Amino acid sequence: MAKWRIAAKKADFEAIGREHGIDPVIARIIRNRDRITPEEIREYLYGEITDLPSGDLLKGVPEAAALLAEKIRKKKKLRIIGDYDADGICASYILKRGLTLCGDTGADIVIPHRIKDGYGINCQLLLQAHEEGVDTILTCDNGIAAIEEFDYAAGLGLTCIITDHHEPVYEETEEGRSYRLPVADIIIDPKQPGCSYPNKQICGAAVAWKLMIKLWEIMGVVTAEREELLELAGFATVCDVMELLGENRILVKEALRRMRHSGNPGLRALMKVYEIDGERLSAYHIGFLLGPCLNAAGRLDTALRALELLQCRKEREAIFLAAQLKELNESRKEMTERGVQEGIEQICRNGWDKDRVMVVFLPDCHESLAGIIAGRLREIYYRPVFVITGSREGVKGSARSIESYSLYEEMTKCKELFTKYGGHRQAAGFSMEEEKIDTFRERINALCTLQPEDMEEKLLIDVPMPFSYVTRELIRQLELLEPFGMGNPKPVFAQKGMTFLSCRVMGRHGDMARFTVADSGGNRFCLVLFRKFEKWKEDAGNIYGSHRLERWMKGQETGTEEPIVMDVSYYPSLNEYMGRSELQFVMLDWK
């Protein structure tokens, strides 16, 4: 189980609570999210669109908008080249819709095929654009690392505008990092040198949205569709696992509010096939249900199917397309589960569970699933994980990391082993020659500086708080902290010494349970556990004995036996059913 740590950040929580009309517990959680000043706290609680930084601060946005306006007026042929994940699909849609609203009905979209084309722009796509009379290339969610490709584009005479949010290529020198940027007419990327934009963690779709807002301003376009495109920028922010603080949190919060009555038939259809009540829509639904449907198209088929859904304007057709994407995503889940099991077997068979960095080769696995499988293995072993699959040329892979390990930086230290690589601190993709896999495994582990404590999963307790403190009003105030996600996790509370009185097993697979528990004062509460019941039984059986636990679960134990007592970390909620609601506590971990 995880190692528990209690957040120990200090502040006058009573005073903050009085100033902002919130419970001191809520004030403490906000402080744990590093919101310190009154203005930061106000923005966190009540931030609106007007609090977002101007897109003019993004280096290249004013110039790119002016150049696009000139191209539109001259009726030059524009081509958007996107990416096959949810962020790239949403960004492509935003750019196309934004250009159309400015009168450019001729701009088209090309999204590389994950297997045939690989990630991002390539020379073949550029040559094809040139041969088809394209004047201007506009990338989204890719391009910042395509050095050779844009050299080639310049030779073809193409005008090129890059919009991206990934790390630029760099080399470590004695003077610090030396960046290499593509030769493009204009580059927009908050991570490029010299960009003063305050939020370096916006997604590709948000970058595209900012550019379109500036373009509309220059072109004198006033449109209500800015709201719909905001929905897609917020949607992509969740899908690309951006940090949900500051601007990103406001974007997602506003997107969720608008998506409840979305103006996009495709988004409405996705919610309908998943039977999601718009009023209860959350970042969880986007991150774990709706977003993966868009990603599944790019993984197992073509991202153009997902783009078609977003562009669809007929309700019936949108429902049909959404149902297809849902079915595709279900297939992806089954294939992923097989890959995870194969990865676990390989790790155990080879003793790689002792490695600080895991490198797994699944030659027959669909290459598009490598990242998901890497993420699942990371959760199981709490190590950085590289999953490599077979491909037409050499092998390809994806990696997912833990908090204390920067994938991109560590991969840069052995970049000569890759034919291509790129990504973030927490996620990366790459290709290499198959014969270099073992060398890479040795090298990446030899370079690793992770210490044992870095590889121990930690659970940060926001507030040690008795169950009896929780009220319906406190739960209502907890909703002010949403949306939850990367950088703004759902708060975690804990109470020591809870006595487990009874248990009812639930769920189709028997992996959930509903307990009745009591505190030291004899107050009784409903405590539920999702998906971890087998692990709870194993731990409880190790402490109290499996036979005794079995009797307890059947209600057959004697009154002389030692009660089952555990420390519990939890999150409080309201269980609403058949018009009634009751307080319940969701168990996250136990000691």
Image: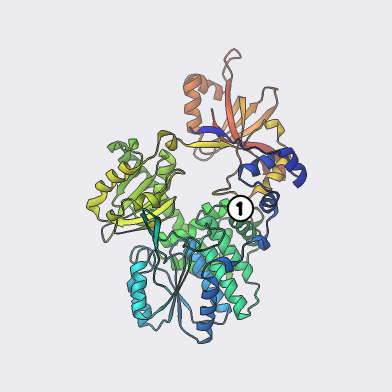
- Asked if one can make out residue 335 in the rendered structure from this viewpoint, the answer is no
Tell me residue 38's x, y (percent): 70, 49
Judged from this view, the residue extending furthest toward the top is 560
Of 207 and 302, nearer the camera is: 207
Q: Secondary structure at mark 1?
A: loop
Left or right of 370, for residue 432: left
Judged from this view, the residue extending furthest toward the bottom is 74
Tell me residue 314's x, y (percent): 57, 72
Looking at the rendered image, the quarter that the C terminus falls into is top right
The residue positioned 68% from the left and 44% from the top of the image is 478
The residue positioned 60% from the left and 65% from the top of the image is 230
Left or right of 591, for residue 352: left
- Amino acid marked by disc 1: Ser
The residue positioned 35% from the left and 64% from the top of the image is 118
326 w.r.t. 93: above or below:
above
All told, the count of numbered labels is 1
Tell me residue 198's x, y (percent): 57, 59
Tell me residue 441's x, y (percent): 29, 45
Of 197 and 322, nearer the camera is: 197
113 w.r.t. 42: above or below:
below
Residue behind mark 1: 282
Q: Give the crowd class for mark 1: few <14, some 14-19, many >=20 residues within 10 Å.
A: many
467 w.r.t. 431: above or below:
above
The residue positioned 72% from the left and 45% from the top of the image is 579
Classify residue 217 by image quadrant. Answer: bottom right
- Asked if one can make out residue 466 in the rendered structure from this viewpoint, the answer is yes
Of 372 and 319, nearer the camera is: 372
Classify residue 395 by image quadrant. Answer: bottom left
